[in-house]
Amino acid sequence: MATCTRISLRKLRIYQISDEISGNFICGMMVFTPWAFGTTQPWAIWTMNIAAYSLGILWGVKSAIRYSTGYRPARWDRKDVVVQTPEARLSRTLTRGLMTMTGLLLVYCLINVLNARSTYHPEIVSFEYFPFISWLPASHDRAASLKSFFSYLALALSFWAVHDWLAVKSPTEERAERQLSKETRAAFAPVPYARLRKLLWVLTISGGLLGIEGIVQRLSNTPDLLFLMPTYNNQAAEDQFGPYAYRANAAQYLNLAWPVCLGFWWMRQRARARSFSGKERRPGKNDIILGAVAIMAACPMISSSRVGALVDLIQITLASFILLSAGNRAHAGQGRKGILIFLVISLSLGIFLGWSKLSPRIDSTTFQKDLEARNTMYDMARPMARDYPLYGTGPGSFESVFQLYRIDPDEFWPAQLHNDWLETRITFGWVGCGLIGFSLLCALVRWFIPTGIPLRRYFAMLIWVAIGGCLMYARYDFPFQIYSILFLFVMLCSILFSISGKPGKLPLSNQKPFI
């Protein structure tokens, strides 16, 4: 329960307003980023950055009020209690470790900017060189690295603001816990996770509508994104999908979203099955969720993205296996029927609407030709990683530096390498990759530590499936160079860092509210 020492009514009201605005900002950003043409245009990127900075300011206001007044709103991670259990201390240590890694990564990017050895001027196709300290990270393109730093700062603030918002219980949940505590003196109350549910509802509805719009746009054969904006590249309708000018990016986003939404449906299905045990089941919101998930799962195949369809099929197989093997209780039967319905709809829809465009692209001759072109790019880029192994060339500097490694000026000059694993190693070096890898590992293992939103392992496993599919896709494409995909990836990591397999329990010496 919420506790405090000396908070005024005015500060409490400021805290509550900041918290409410934070939730609205988070949901609005979740909707805006894919629909703003994938957030690939400068105006869309800066809109998201400014929104994230505002979210960070609200997080800072709430943290300052908690720190200065001793106000402790009821939280799932048990940071609202005074006497800490060993599991709570372990959770706090991991949180501090991830915060440290986040700060170090931002400082690493900032050093690259301040200590830049050069910057690239595209208008004159030339580099301007600066004096720099050789033993520190130094970017080869200050302007590009500065742009990347602003985006990474926004993503970091979004991660921690979402984690803080999800970790705090809603007023309804707090009242439910207080009432239960009066009766049982138990530390944990089984209440619905309102804030997480709200966020997942937004993702599900937005993703489902995005899939429907992409299908309608593909069937109408229009070359304008969202029927509004023509594109400079990929002008053919079959090269696009929905608001994305590159069909693979749309497949990457939807493959990242639908496994999590399927886990959301499964959680609601189990709760609904228990509530309606022995009663006739009626169609409801769960059917809407399942339909939206099936549409999203079918879209990577309809988009005619080869790797997208492959990753999609792997994810469908893994997700179905996880949920079909989720226990043998009676209430799981209805869930298994839903999974079979999901399989039939998604596969049938994907094959019926997508096979005619996808089959020519998986022809062995076409596939081999495209693969050889990708391998040629990789071969030209690998010397970049060997020349700058420790610190890399600087965040965001790949496009400007790659031209120096082309043998022929007429060779293809890509903006992205179509291999985010190699491009990240080139631009961040082993030091930066180590910071990124450790941060991702902290998010992936957080579920195993008690204290957090207590959710079953099936939901966490489906988030792992979504993240794993995106990492697999990154070997052959550039999902992490697209703001909307990277933002959703960060949001899923924040959700994963906020949930746990076991609820945190208060020590016996602290069963009563702290006053």
Image (spheres, rainbow, N blue to C red):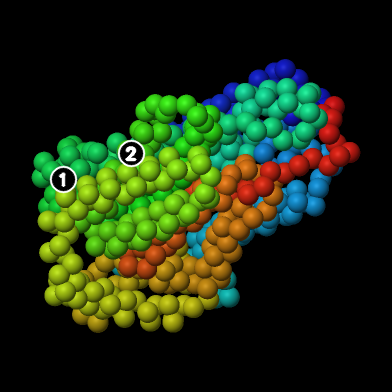
Kindly report which numbered mark, 2 or 1, lies closer to the viewer in this rendering. 2
Mark 2 or mark 1, earlier in chain: 1
Asked where in the image residue 180 lies, by quadrant, the reply is top right
Say what secondary structure mark 1 lies in: helix
x and y percent of residue 309 in the render?
Answer: 27, 59
Up-down: is 397 above or below 454?
below
Give the answer, above or below, for where 367 lies relative to 359: below
Quadrant of the snapshot with the N terminus = top right
Q: Is residue 431 left or right of residue 474?
A: right
Mark 1: which amino acid?
Answer: Arg
Number of numbered callouts drawn: 2
Image quadrant assignment for residue 146: bottom left
Neighbour tally class for label 1: few under 14, some 14-19, many 20 plus, Cα within 10 Å: many
Pointer 1: what residue? 218
Circle 2 packing at 10 Å, graded few (<14), some (14-19), many (20+), is many
Label 2 element class: helix
Observer-nearest of 55 and 296: 296
- Pinpoint residue 7: horizontal percent, then vertical percent: 77, 24
Q: Look at the image and tell me whether residue 111 can be seen.
A: no
Mark 2 residue type: Ala
Specify the label residue 292 is tagged with.
2
Q: Quadrant of residue 57?
A: top right
The quadrant of the rendering that contains the C terminus is top right
Task: Out of 67 and 495, give the one closest to the viewer.
Answer: 495
Whole-angstrom CA distance, mark 2 to mark 1, is 18 Å
What residue appears at the point 68 percent right and 53 percent down from the top-left corner? 449
Q: Who's the residue at 57% across and 34% down the image?
A: 193
User: Height in image: 372 above or below 114?
Assistant: below
| Residue for point 50% across, 29% down | 278
Give the number of the disc on residue 472: none
Expressed as whole percent of the image width and height from the top left, the position of residue 90 reads 74, 54
Whole-percent x and y of residue 226?
Answer: 21, 39
